[in-house]
Image (cartoon, rainbow, N blue to C red):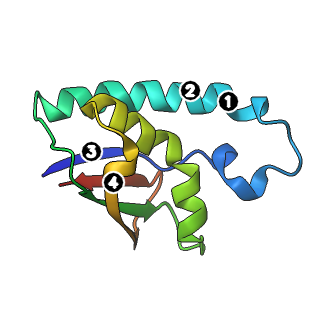
Amino acid sequence: MIEIVLPFPDKRLNPNRANGRHYSAVASIKKKVRCDTAIIAKVVANGLKFDLNDICIKVTFVYPDKRHRDLDNLYAACKAMVDGIADGLGINDKQFHPVILMREYGKKPGETRIEIG
């Protein structure tokens, strides 16, 4: 099993914040998140190989405060992270099944813990 700890998802990536904005408004943010996460995943995996079967992924959002957030929106906001992890591991993100979403209440600035395997 691999655990990767990343920042709490950028609020600009939340799908509820789109408000009719063009997709290119957040494309550069998504690209940076995906590239940075791919590098982190490659380093953390340290040469581990994954087979072509389904790989369980558990995403725990550690909230920076006590405000309520929808887990499905948070997962959508961290999609670039998940894609970057798949890139770094050299697999297709469709292999991430099942996807388990959890939440915890922490303190600022919050974090996203992703456990793979």
Which of marks 3 and 2 precedes in the sequence? Answer: 3
Quarter of the image containing the C terminus?
bottom left
Mark 4: amino acid: Phe
Which badge, 3 or 1, comes first in the chain's sequence? 3
In what element is the residue under mark 4?
strand
Query: Residue 42 lies in what quarter of the image?
Result: top left
Q: How dense is the environment of label 2, judged by Cα within 10 Å: few (below 14), some, or many (20 and up)? A: some
Left or right? Give the position of 27 relative to 78.
right
Q: CA distance from mark 1 to mark 2?
A: 6 Å
Say which mark, if any, is on residue 27.
1
Q: Residue at x 56, y 67 (%)?
A: 72
Outermost residue on the front side: it is 52
Q: Secondary structure at mark 3?
A: strand
At 54% from the left and 73% from the top, the residue drawn is: 66
- Are the residues tagged 3 and 1 within 8 Å (C-beta)? no
Residue position marked by numbered label 2 in the rendering: 31
Dot 4 corresponds to which residue?
96
Q: Position of residue 114 (x, y in %)?
A: 31, 53
Callout 2 amino acid: Lys
Which quadrant of the structure image shows residue 13?
top right
Q: Residue at 12% across / 35% down in the picture?
A: 49
Q: CA distance from mark 3 to mark 1?
A: 23 Å
In the image shown, does 5 or 65 lie closer to the viewer?
5
Residues at circles 2 and 3 in contact by the CB criterion of under 8 Å: no
> Which residue carries the number 3 mark?
4
Q: Residue at 24%, 55% (x, y): give it.
A: 55
Q: Nearer the viewer, mark 4 or mark 2?
A: 4
Question: What amino acid is labelled 3 in the image?
Answer: Ile
Residue 65 sits above or below residue 2 on the image: below
Asked whether the residues under the numbered discs 4 and 3 touch, taking CB atoms below 8 Å apart as contact, a structural biologist would say no
